[in-house]
Amino acid sequence: MSDQPADLVDGPLAEIVVDLAAIRNNVRVLRGLVGVPLIAVVKADGYGHGMVEAAHAAREGGAEWIAVATVDEALRLRAAGYGGPLLCWLMLPGTNLERPVAEGIDVTAYTGAELDAIAAAAEAAGRRARVQLKVDTGLNRGGAPRATWADLFARAREGERDGSWKVTGLWSHFACSDEPAHPANDRQEQAFRAAVALAEDGGLRPELLHLANSAGAVLRPSSRFDAVRCGISIYGLDPAPGSTPDLGLVPAMTVRTRLGLVKDLVPGDGVSYGHRWVADRPTTVGLVPLGYGDGVPRHAFRPGGPGNPDNTAEVAVGGKRRPIRGSVCMDQFMVDLGGDPAAAGDEVVLFGAGPDVPTAQDWAEACGTISYEIVTRIGGRMTRTYVDSEERRS
Ligand SMILES: *Cc1c(COP(=O)(O)O)cnc(C)c1O
């Protein structure tokens, strides 16, 4: 979704509309609930909402910190003018660390080798680095495994003494916080407390201890420590479907387009590649000019078997939910209009906010995935536009 070239004849066929007021509202609600600083996570282009715009709206809503995954993302935020507290956590051997150190970005270390690289970068930048240490408390993804904590903390203390860096934070990440009763949550929180104690025994005094993502922040007050890292919830999507109380979060993203064509079918007509859906009654279908080339999952239509209904996502046309019929193609898919009056040019909403519109969570359930993937992958040829529903009201 780079800038559109100026010589486009007609522009994109669909748009992603992001309501910045929704992000501000969600951050305000979450910040009020947790009562500790909020680190707004805007990695992966702000979960598809636009990294820079999402960061700005989150700051306006009261987020004290911004976080991204990669060093490049952090540098792009700095280049866009964001000068505040900023954390990143994903790098490879050889990642250039001099620039993030020079620009006052908090970098995360999992290993002594990474600390050595940060020391060299601090030396080259002529500036004391800001380092956060990440411990693995059971996710078994990034972070220092428990057996290495003592050595990592010792090396971190050494670098503080010799002026290479200040250890600004110590943190970890949950595996199962969207299942609040999962025993891994207690185990991870206990392990994190043990890491904090060990770090303090080793002479470290990190200012910012943080463990919780959105689901932890909302559902597990004991995991809030000095800050929470909220991603999916700031975009108004449910971090723990089935467990989250109604907080008044508002989905920030709406995806909309128009019908390209409406046609009649008779019983026995198969629709789209492979004829994986066959009409069993007369109906009308409408063409939606979006497909997996735009991040619409092909999984949004899967035929059922004998006695089993099809798995299908729905879109809103004319105020009604309309199921997908047949395979989602690269550029288009068909929806069932059930014979209702409809014409080429009518508005189609794939998902968004509001009572008559499917949510990204509805799409996730239909596709057998999570809402994170739906909003982060959508895009392709679409354009993204920003609205501010608060500004319109005032
Ligand atoms: C993506 C991410 C988050 C945000 O998680 P949500 O569930 O979207 O709130 C927090 N911390 C880390 C390390 C992450 O990778």
Image (tube, helix red, strand yellow):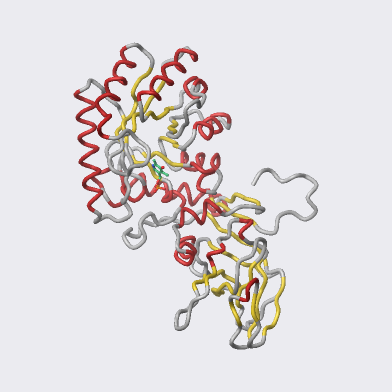
| Horizontal side of residue 138 vs 353, given as left or right | left
Count of residue discs: 0
The quarter of the picture where residue 248 lies is bottom left
Foreground of the two, 324 or 210: 324
The spot of residue 197 in percent (x, y) is 19, 30
Residue at 33% x, 54% y is: 178
Of 152 and 73, the residue lying toward us: 152
Q: Looking at the image, which is closer to me, 131 or 82?
A: 131
- Residue at position x 48%, y 52% from top? 22
| In front of the other: 193 or 301 | 301
- Ligand 1's image quarter is top left
In the rendered image, residue 339, in percent from the top left (x then y), is placed at 63, 84
Tell me: residue 80, above or below residue 393: above
Whether 134 is drawn above or below 223: the answer is above
In x, y percent, where is residue 324?
Answer: 57, 72
| Residue 92 placement, left or right of 37 | right
Residue 74, image x, y percentages: 50, 32
Residue found at x 50% / y 31%: 71
What residue is at 36 percent from the left and 30 percent from the top? 110
